[in-house]
Image (spheres, rainbow, N blue to C red):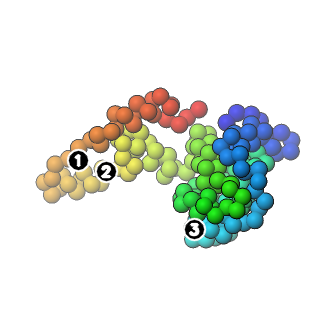
Amino acid sequence: MAGETNNSGINFELRKDIINVDKNIVKCFQCGTCVSSCVASFVLSPGKYSPRQTILKALYGSELAFKDKNLWMCGNCYHCYERCPKGVHPTDVLGKLKEISFSMGQAPQPVVDRVNNILSTGRALSIAGSELVRGRVGMSKLEEFKFAPEIKKIAELTKGGKK
Ligand code: SF4
Ligand code: SF4
């Protein structure tokens, strides 16, 4: 994401990027169907996370949309996407905001660790603990994930998601 936030708190470049991801976002009329469908909002962070509010911030081009760490509570369940009466695709918008957050070094550490694991080994989780236990009981080491080289190549070509 490029561009600067003006005195009114609007980053027009961010707004343009978001509308490119989902042109239907301009139809959002803040009905709240998304937040009332959102498991993350109800279970993980009651009152702290609202896709409706995030959509509003994104639509206005407010950087608060991707600076809020609670954004990462979204588990990509697509309930909001399926139920929005105006055909807005909050999951896609949230995905873009997570991408921006990550590329600006603002993603939570567990997310960064997981991405680094995928880029270096092809696995989302570290298997160091499993390897230790396997060694103790006389089992062989796990084979390297066979698509790891391809994943490394993709990471090189895409700069590992960094801008
Ligand atoms: S359900 Fe759709 S229209 Fe309603 S607030 Fe959420 S994104 Fe906006
Ligand atoms: S995709 Fe994310 S924001 Fe939408 S309902 Fe699921 S957890 Fe909530």
Q: Residue at x 40, y 43 (%)?
A: 118
Instruction: Dividing the image into four quarters, tell me where ligand 1 lies.
Output: bottom right
* Secondary structure found at label 3: helix
Nearer mark to the viewer, of 1 and 3: 3
Question: What residue sits right under mark 3 in the picture?
Answer: 39
Question: What residue sits right under mark 1 in the picture?
Answer: 142
**What amino acid type is highlighted by mark number 1?**
Leu
| Residue contact at pointers 3 and 2, CB within 8 angstroms | no
Dot 3 or dot 2, earlier in sequence? 3
Q: In the figure, 139 relative to 115: above or below?
A: below
Q: Farthest residue to the right: give it.
A: 7
**What amino acid type is highlighted by mark number 3?**
Val
Question: What residue sits right under mark 2 in the picture?
Answer: 127
| Residue contact at pointers 1 and 2, CB within 8 angstroms | yes
Specify the quadrant that holds the N terminus: top right
Decide which of 58, 121 is in the foreground and name it: 58
Tell me if the residue at label 3 has its CB under 8 Å from ligand 2: yes
Q: How crowded is the residue under tag 2: few (<14 C-alpha within 10 Å), some, or many (20+)?
A: few
Dot 1 or dot 2, earlier in sequence? 2
* Secondary structure found at label 1: loop
Q: How crowded is the residue under tag 1: few (<14 C-alpha within 10 Å), some, or many (20+)?
A: few
Q: In the figure, 149 relative to 100: above or below?
A: above
Q: Position of residue 153 (x, y in %)?
A: 40, 30
Residue 1 visible in the current orientation = yes
Q: Residue at x 57, y 59 (%)?
A: 78
